[in-house]
């Protein structure tokens, strides 16, 4: 399902933006997001280095940031077991924490920095808007995709006290299936040796407890912000297309959409939705920047999309 709307206009906002464009030879969108002119004439061009001067998703580079990221994955791989995920889905699936709007949740992310991310240490609301603005530039008619980018990480509110203040390893980072063998495509795979599921023979074959082609909806995926936001959107009656919900639920499933692992568990609908996830992933990963979006400038546009696809208040 693709929903079309009139193409939004991207125009310079005042003399400051004009000066930035002249001095840097770059186009600045109305949110303050900078894109090279070559990309403005065509499509988004992925940069070669992140905001720390390193390659994106380089989990082996020597730095203080990388050391903390590896420690994060050590804890995640040890603690994310099948039983743990089952308990989390049952607990948070009740959606009994708070009632609030999508935008109110966006503002809560000003308090969150993702410790698993080797590419950016800005508050999460900036990452959401950077992703959304970059997609909005290249896919102006796919407003559902703009909104999907804005909300895809909202589940990171699980880190906050009012949502249980879960540890980072239970909220962020790459996701992976439980109930079958841990594929070597997973980042820092070596730490799975201490996961309790290693001792369960039923979980240690390629298919594990699943059948080939069973569909990802039938697979237990490690618990975190992805699955939580998917539950929030689905149970509150969002009218986002299935591809939007698929992106929200599996955008951190890098072993699948980046490395090609676990594809034997996908069904035909998954394969169709994966096309949109691959499109989205480029913007999710490579739009991270130290150039911050002017939140108040873009807020009216995104609030209009929220009103289109979501109720005014949601259960979280």
Image (tube, rainbow, N blue to C red):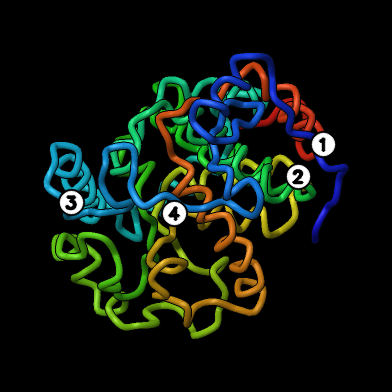
Q: SS for tag 4?
A: loop
Say which label, 1 or 2, has the lower sequence index.
2
| Residue at image point 36% right, 54% down | 174
Q: Nearer the viewer, residue 70 or 83?
A: 70
Q: How many marks?
A: 4
Query: Which residue is the site of mark 1?
Result: 308
CA–CA distance in space, label 1 to label 3: 41 Å
- Identify the residue position indicated by label 4 in the image: 252
Q: Is residue 90 left or right of residue 166?
A: right
Distance between the alpha carbons at the discs numbered 2 and 4: 22 Å
Residue, far front: 22
Using a 10 Å C-alpha cutoff, classify the residue at mark 2 as few (fewer than 14 neighbours), some (14 to 19) or many (20 or more). many
Residue 74: give its label: 3
Query: Could you classify mark 3 by the number of other residues whose Cα lies within 10 Å: few (under 14), some (14-19), or many (20 or more)?
Result: many
| Residue denoted by label 2 | 143
**x 56%, y 27%: residue:** 22
Report the mark closest to the observer, 1 or 2. 2
Quadrant containing the C terminus is: top right
Q: CA distance from mark 1 to mark 2?
A: 10 Å
Please tell me in which quadrant of the rendered image residue 261 appears. Answer: bottom left
Q: Is residue 35 left or right of residue 81?
A: right
Q: Is residue 234 visible?
A: no
Residue at horizontal 11%, vertical 47%? 62
* Quadrant of the rendering where the N terminus is positioned: bottom right
């Amino acid at each position: 399902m693709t929903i079309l709307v009139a193409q939004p206009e991207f125009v310079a906002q005042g003399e400051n933006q004009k000066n930035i464009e002249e001095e840097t030879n770059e186009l600045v969108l109305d949110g303050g997001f900078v894109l090279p002119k070559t990309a403005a004439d065509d499509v988004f061009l992925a940069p070669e280095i992140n905001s720390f001067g390193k390659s994106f998703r380089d989990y082996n580079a020597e730095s203080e940031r990388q050391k903390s990221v590896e420690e994060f994955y050590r804890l995640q791989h040890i603690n994310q077991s099948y039983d743990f995920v089952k308990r989390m889905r049952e607990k948070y699936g009740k959606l009994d924490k708070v009632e609030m709007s999508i935008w109110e949740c966006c503002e809560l992310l000003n308090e969150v920095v993702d410790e698993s991310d080797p590419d950016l240490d800005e508050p999460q609301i900036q990452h959401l808007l950077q992703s959304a603005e970059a997609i909005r530039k290249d896919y102006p008619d796919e407003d559902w995709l703009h909104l999907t980018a804005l909300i895809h990480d909202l589940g990171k509110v699980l880190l906050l006290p009012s949502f249980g203040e879960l540890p980072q390893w239970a909220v962020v980072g790459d996701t992976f299936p439980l109930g079958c063998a841990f594929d070597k495509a997973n980042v820092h795979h070596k730490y799975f040796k201490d996961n309790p599921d290693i001792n369960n023979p039923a979980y240690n074959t390629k298919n594990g407890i699943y059948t080939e082609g069973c569909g990802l909806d039938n697979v237990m995926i490690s618990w975190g912000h992805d699955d939580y936001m998917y539950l929030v959107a689905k149970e509150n009656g969002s009218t986002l297309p299935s591809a939007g919900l698929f992106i929200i639920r599996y955008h951190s499933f890098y072993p699948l959409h980046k490395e090609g692992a676990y594809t034997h568990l996908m069904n035909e609908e998954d394969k169709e939705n994966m096309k949109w996830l691959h499109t989205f992933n480029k913007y999710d990963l490579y739009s991270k920047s130290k150039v911050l979006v002017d939140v108040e400038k873009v807020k009216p546009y995104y609030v209009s999309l929220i009103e289109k696809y979501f109720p005014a208040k949601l259960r979280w």
